[in-house]
Amino acid sequence: MTSQHEHEWIRQQAAASLLRIDPTNVGCLDLIVNLLKTTESWRTQAKIVDSIEQTSFGNLIAINRLEDFLENCSNNYVKKKTAISLAKINPGNAKAISTLLQILRDSNNSPRANDDIVWSLGEIGENNLEVVRMLIQLFERKHDSENGLVNHLHERNLSFESRSLCKAATQSMYRTVVENLKRYLSDENFKNHFEQFKAAYESVWHCAENMNYQDFCRAWNSSPRVEPSKN
């Protein structure tokens, strides 16, 4: 550890300890946020974000500081972590959710790279139609016949999308879920893409259990409302 990193570590530890003692201490919060902005170590940034998340639920000053940091954060890992933490201390935070959705749209990472985002969206994106639409589109991404290996790995992670979709979707959105996922419940999909079939079935079944019969029939017999993902 270099002397600079050692100095940053000491400051980070001291500020984190003070925050745990007095989460409302604005001076301490400003100190740790300033270190968050100035350090070149993504590990230090991640630890600072953890400290703020653990001590600042509902703290408007901390929420504003993280929103400002998110605007200029260039490290994708830290940006993702900051957005997730921001959404935890301020459930439904629009900037956090839009950042997470954008990371998913732009992502060319490995199949498991953004499981934490998908899982978090289920926790923080309840009753958010944009979140529901994104989770639905992730089903489409899994169906890439040109890359069998990637497709197989993606399908194994579809349970994350299904569980998060069930958490995020509310009564007014069940029809959208059924309309768009019913196409994955074919006999062909059952034989060739069972994980996708199973995940879609779980989501549709969850909706069916919470819809009246007439609404479910209308959804089942209507056309999809969400455009397939082009990624």
Image (spheres, rainbow, N blue to C red):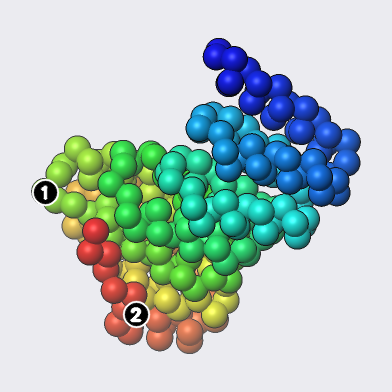
Image quadrant occupied by the N terminus? top right
Task: Kindly identify the residue that appears in the image at 24 percent across and 58 percent down.
Answer: 231
Q: Residue at x 81, y 45 (%)?
A: 27
> Which percent across, then down, holds residue 141?
27, 56
Q: Is residue 26 visible?
A: yes
Mark 1, secondary structure of its residue: loop
Look at the picture and state if 184 lies above or below 156.
below
| Residue nearest the viewer, comparing 130 with 145 | 130
210 shown above or below 167: below
- The image shows residue 46 at horizontal and vertical percentages of 57, 35
Q: Is residue 231 left or right of residue 100?
A: left
Q: Amino acid at mark 1?
A: Glu
State the residue position of label 2: 225
Q: Which mark is residue 146?
A: 1
Residue 197 visible somewhere in the drawing: no
**Badge 1, how many Cα within 10 Å: few under 14, some, many 20+?**
few
Tell me the amino acid under the disc marked 2. Answer: Arg
Q: Residue at x 58, y 71 (%)?
A: 127
Along the viewing direction, whichever of 107 and 203 lies nearer the viewer: 107
